[in-house]
Image (tube, rainbow, N blue to C red):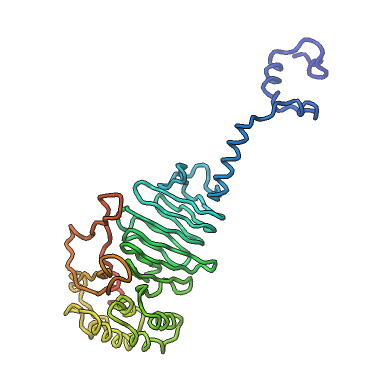
Amino acid sequence: MNEEYLWDRSGAPDPEIERLEQTLAPLRYRHRAEVARMPKPSRARWAMAAAAAVVLGAVGVSQFATPQAQDSAWQVAGTNVRRGQVLRTGASGVQLEADAVGRVDLAPNSELRATGEKRLELTRGELHAFIWAPAREFVVDTPSARAVDLGCQYTLTVDDHGDGDLKVSMGWVAFEVAGRESFIPAGAQCRTRKRTGPGIPWFEDSSEAFRGALAAFERGDAGALQSVLREAREHDGLSLWHLLTRVGNEERGAVFDRLAQLVSLPGEATRESVVRGIIARSICAGMRWGWRIPGGGGAGSGSGRLSRRRIRPSSNYTTCSGCPSKRRVHYRPPSAGLLRALRA
């Protein structure tokens, strides 16, 4: 090796040193004059970079997933969303799609995280889900409850405090946390709070007096229970059905009496068995209660009523005509969880 060449580039160069210089040439220091003479990127390249920035800015994708994170089932504008990746929207929303799951529209000013292959977590904001995957495969976690898809279409919102609201327009959705469950059919709505979890659902066409009394009861006003029972009408049986699991034995009798006045209950569901929580396992296994949706699936077109339905294992679900998949199934009759709670 020629040491003089290494010092002041005099003498014959060493071939190995020359190869090293050529390799490191792009990283060498440049004077301002050299930088000024460098070719500028073409307009096409600047346009492509600007377009990419606009897309990322609109979607609000925060790359918190590690490079080794697996892809989820979801895509945004044809780009895979990785597990653990966070989507934050600004002034405009974004749409997530998964061929085997469905479509989720994330509203502006929202934050969503892909926590699994099909699972999502809504931290704040609003999403609208249209799902054709089999029941219970699509789940959205929130700070106060977990929304489990049992149907086709719903809207979920989460405020800055972590409290949420769920409106179902087609099928069923279950709200659950720590063993507490609420089942919301089409045309109904349910609130959830960080401190208490899922509340009692109600049909959107319920009277204002009934909704006000129900809200007061859920805020802790025990005296509002009598107003809830007094203002309840036939289609409010859905709320009373859930209320059976949210009151003590003394109040449960009054709730059962009012529910029995509004809807036709199975003969096995006696007042004594409900009040004392003594419901035989065989009765629970044999009963399948389902809410007949007003007008066949929409709100405001009639009264929902509680009816006894025997569901064969081969027909636990019904087909949703509005779903793009012919294999789409609707819901599992939700009464089993509530009856288990009554036994507890």
- Which quarter shows the C terminus? bottom left
Residues 317 and 205: in front is 205
Numbered marks: total: 0
Question: Residue at left 71%, top 16%?
Answer: 18
Where is residue 278? Give x, y as percent: 24, 80
- Which quarter shows the N terminus? top right
Where is residue 287? Give x, y as percent: 19, 71
Residues 118 and 344: in front is 118
* Residue 91 in sight in this render: yes
Residue 54: quadrant of the picture: top right
Question: Residue at left 69%, top 24%?
Answer: 24
Name of the residue lying farthest toward the front: 301
Residue 74 to residue 295: above or below: above
Where is residue 58? Give x, y as percent: 55, 49
Residue 135: quadrant of the picture: bottom left
> Going by the image, does 105 lie left or right of 291?
right
Name of the residue lying farthest toward the top: 12
Where is residue 264? Give x, y as percent: 20, 79
Residue 94 to residue 4: above or below: below
Question: Residue at left 49%, top 57%?
Answer: 107
